[in-house]
Each structure stands twice: as structure tokens, then as C-alpha cells.
Image (cartoon, helix red, strand yellow):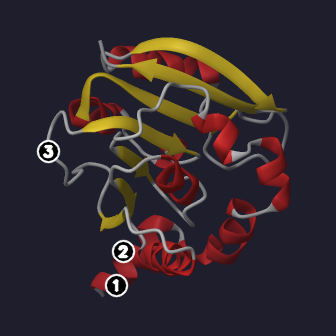
Amino acid sequence: MMAHHRNHTHGQHQHKGKVSYLDSPKRREEMPPEKLLNLIPIKQNATILDFGAGTGYFSIPAAKLVGGPVYALDLDDSMLEMIRSKAQQENITNIVPIQGHSDKIPLPDASIDVVIASLVLHEIQPLAPTLTQLKNVLKEGGYLICVELEPKAGPGQHAPRITMAGMEQAITDAGLRIMEKHFPAESLYVLIARKP
């Protein structure tokens, strides 16, 4: 019963489609992870949290960029398993997979330099407690990189999405300061926020 409940909450049935999109060449073209990581100054010894890490789309390149630990946090252990095997294949030793919920991030306050939240925050209801958690784990002056899709207008659009204005407001309400906005592809937006 418990397993069913966990799968149910995460929409496991969309799994295959999600994985193929998360790793797709189209996505890489629209938003190369290296390019996104270059938008902010990341120190060599930085500690990074890839929040909702999925297939490791950002965790793997981030781990190549820094010598510090890259925490890959996801609810789904099969995603973390995928990240573990990719890291092993590429001899990457600084990825730390963590299975965790968005409402209780198992990391100490002020321990993270950069949080990457890519295509994950729109799934979280209510969002405010999670953003507060992310702010808490960030060090002073730490960055949050948020990547999301603008909602599409028109019928047949049932996927939960958050407009850039809505996300900007939520991040600001959590006490972070929006520094930059980028639009790497149609309907894709990137917000870079900093903990004051």
C-alpha cells in the first residue's frame, strides 16, 4: 500500500516519457547544462544541490565543474540509481545521491553554494515551504538557479506550470533576490536568485 501511495504521488506512470525528455538532444540543444552553470560564478570548491535531480542532467556536468560535493536529490530512487551508474561510468566521485522530499531537505542550513531546481518547482504544491527550505540550505550569497516552462495557452494544456511572474513572486516572497532572467528557448525561462 505504501509503495502504491509513493508512486501515486509522483506520477510514476509518465516515467518513460519524462526520462526520454529529460535526456533528449532537443533539451540539450535548448539548454546545455554547461551553459546554464556558466551563468553564475561557481567556485572550484563549491557545494551544489541539484534539487529534483531526475536523470542527472545537471548533477553530472556540475560534478565535473567543481571539486566539492554535488548533492543529487530526488524522490525517486530509480532516478538516483540512474545517476549513480552514470557517475560510475564517467568516474565521477563527488556526486552524493539523496532520496528526499521537497518539504524536508536532509541537509544542514547554510551548507550549499548553489541550488539548481530545473523543471521541478511547478510540481510542488504549496511551493512556499519548499522555497523557504531551499533558502535555508543556501549559504549567505548563495545562488538559486530556477529553470521552468511558461504555461502554454489553449486547450489540452493540463500540465501544472508556473508563469515567470508567478515564480519570480514566489522566490522573492521566500526572501531571495532575483538577479537575472534568461530565456534560452521558446517558453523556457531561467531565474537566477541570490540569498542576501
Residue occupying the point 41% across, 27% down = 143
Name the residue beneath numbered marker 1. Answer: 3
Q: Taking 118 as reference, is 139 above or below it?
A: above
| Pointer 2 local density, CA inside 10 Å: few below 14, some 14–19, many at least 20 | few
- Three-letter code, disc 3: Pro
Splitting the image into 4 quarters, where does residue 89 fall? Answer: bottom right
Q: Is residue 192 left or right of residue 196?
A: right
Name the residue beneath numbered marker 2. Answer: 6
Q: Earlier in the sequence, mark 3 or mark 1?
A: 1
Q: Gap in Å between the C-alphas at discs 2 and 3?
A: 25 Å
| Callouts 1 and 2 close, C-beta under 8 Å | yes
Residue occupying the point 33% across, 43% down = 47
The picture places residue 42, in percent across and down from the top left corner, at 46, 32
Asked which secondary structure carries label 2, the reply is: helix
The picture places residue 26, in percent across and down from the top left corner, at 85, 54
Splitting the image into 4 quarters, where does residue 113 fall? Answer: top left
Name the residue beneath numbered marker 3. Answer: 108
Splitting the image into 4 quarters, where does residue 48 fall? Answer: top left
Q: Gap in Å between the C-alphas at discs 3 and 1?
A: 28 Å
Most extreme residue toward the left is 108
Q: Taking 178 as reference, is 100 above or below it?
A: below
The picture places residue 139, in percent across and down from the top left corner, at 24, 28
Most extreme residue toward the bottom is 1
- Three-letter code, disc 1: Ala
The picture places residue 125, in percent across and down from the top left corner, at 40, 43
Residue occupying the point 41% across, 33% down = 43
Q: Earlier in the sequence, mark 2 or mark 3?
A: 2
Asked which secondary structure carries label 1, the reply is: helix
